């Protein structure tokens, strides 16, 4: 598709500001039924396995992304009969303002009838104006929750905020919930991750996932601490973030076979029983303390009456 290029697995274009370029993609329906393909422009993203993917909708401004690929070309729908081949041309309108580094876009393709989640094919489209490599830089942006394959996950999100690919990034991350039970060593245990990311896309989120398996997500404050390293460059991260009850409930409802921890309920029950015992003991103690005085008063009254009775008889 690109004359004079030895790159066959993607479009790789050196462009100029304000330029219009065209690329052509050939589609073939090898099936026995008609098909409609959706071809959607996306920016490259980074998966939790350290792979470049094009399945996420990315907008300008995300991770300091200057231009979104969906603003450079438009999506198209390709209708094909069985065994039919079509060549489809996409027009790329390069932004008027100059950009540095790599604008790493792609055409994400999926069967419209099956839906976007069924998409597995993408045609990368890489754009550059300088054809010079730019390094990456990582920052900690926060945490989020999601249900993956009906299991609860907590993600610590790092972001590559530069328009350059990063390779062989080693990440060590620790996350711990901050609560009374955790302080008593009775709550959620700290979770750690030691991962290697082969590739990190420019201006993309690099998710560090923690699979909680059968443990439900708990709302509250979480403390994050970790490092990342590529080559001789190293970053340190730290921060405290909040997971709301609504976020936790949403993920837990979408997960299956969760085992809930009722330690807090047991502790409240024990505390309530302890308070009840104290109240009963105080009541008994108070009763024993004041009962002799009451009896002594009644006994003294009887004795006085008995002494007064003979005197009254003599007087008569």
Image (cartoon, rainbow, N blue to C red):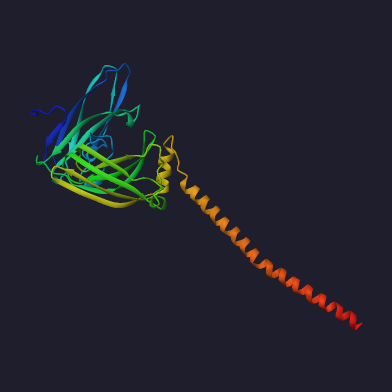
**Eyeballing the image, is 138 above or below 2?**
below
- Rendered-image quadrant of the N terminus: top left
Query: In front here: 241 or 83?
Result: 241
Name the residue rendered at 75%, 71% in the picture: 299
101 to the left or right of 53: left
Name the residue rendered at 38%, 45% in the picture: 188
Name the residue rendered at 33%, 18% in the picture: 33
The quadrant in which residue 196 appears is top left
Residue 276 image offset from top left, x and y in percent: 57, 56
- Rendered-image quadrant of the C terminus: bottom right
Residue 11 image offset from top left, x and y in percent: 15, 31
Residue 222 image offset from top left, x and y in percent: 34, 50
The single residue placed furthest to the left in the displayed view is 4
Name the residue rendered at 55%, 52% in the picture: 273
Query: In front here: 227 or 23?
Result: 227
**Eyeballing the image, is 9 above or below 185?**
above
The single residue placed furthest to the right in the displayed view is 316
């Amino acid at each position: 598709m690109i004359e004079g290029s030895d790159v066959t697995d993607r479009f790789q274009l050196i462009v100029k500001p304000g330029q219009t370029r065209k690329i052509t993609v050939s589609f073939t329906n090898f099936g026995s039924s008609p098909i409609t393909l959706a071809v959607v422009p996306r920016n490259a993203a980074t998966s939790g396995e350290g792979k470049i993917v094009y399945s996420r909708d990315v907008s300008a401004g995300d991770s300091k992304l200057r231009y979104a690929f969906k603003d450079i070309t438009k999506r198209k729908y390709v209708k094909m009969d069985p065994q039919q081949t079509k060549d489809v041309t996409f027009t790329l309108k390069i932004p008027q303002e100059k950009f540095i580094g790599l604008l790493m876009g792609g055409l994400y393709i999926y069967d419209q009838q099956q839906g976007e989640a069924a998409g597995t094919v993408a045609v990368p489209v890489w754009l550059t104006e300088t054809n010079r490599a730019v390094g990456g830089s990582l920052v900690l942006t926060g945490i989020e929750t999601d249900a993956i394959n009906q299991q609860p996950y907590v993600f610590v999100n790092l972001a590559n905020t530069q328009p350059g690919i990063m390779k062989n990034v080693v990440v060590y991350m620790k996350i711990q919930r901050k609560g009374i039970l955790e302080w008593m060593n009775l709550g959620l245990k700290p979770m750690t991750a030691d991962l290697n990311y082969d590739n990190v896309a420019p201006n993309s989120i690099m998710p560090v996932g923690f699979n909680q398996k059968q443990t439900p997500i708990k709302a509250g404050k979480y403390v994050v601490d970790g490092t990342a390293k590529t080559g001789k460059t190293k970053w340190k991260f730290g921060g405290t973030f909040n997971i709301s009850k609504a976020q936790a409930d949403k993920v837990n409802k979408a997960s299956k076979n969760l085992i809930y921890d009722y330690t807090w309920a047991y502790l409240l029950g024990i505390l309530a029983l302890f308070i009840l015992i104290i109240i009963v003991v105080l009541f008994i103690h108070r009763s024993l303390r004041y009962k002799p005085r009451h009896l002594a008063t009644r006994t003294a009254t009887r004795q006085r009456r008995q002494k007064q009775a003979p005197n009254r008889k003599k007087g008569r």
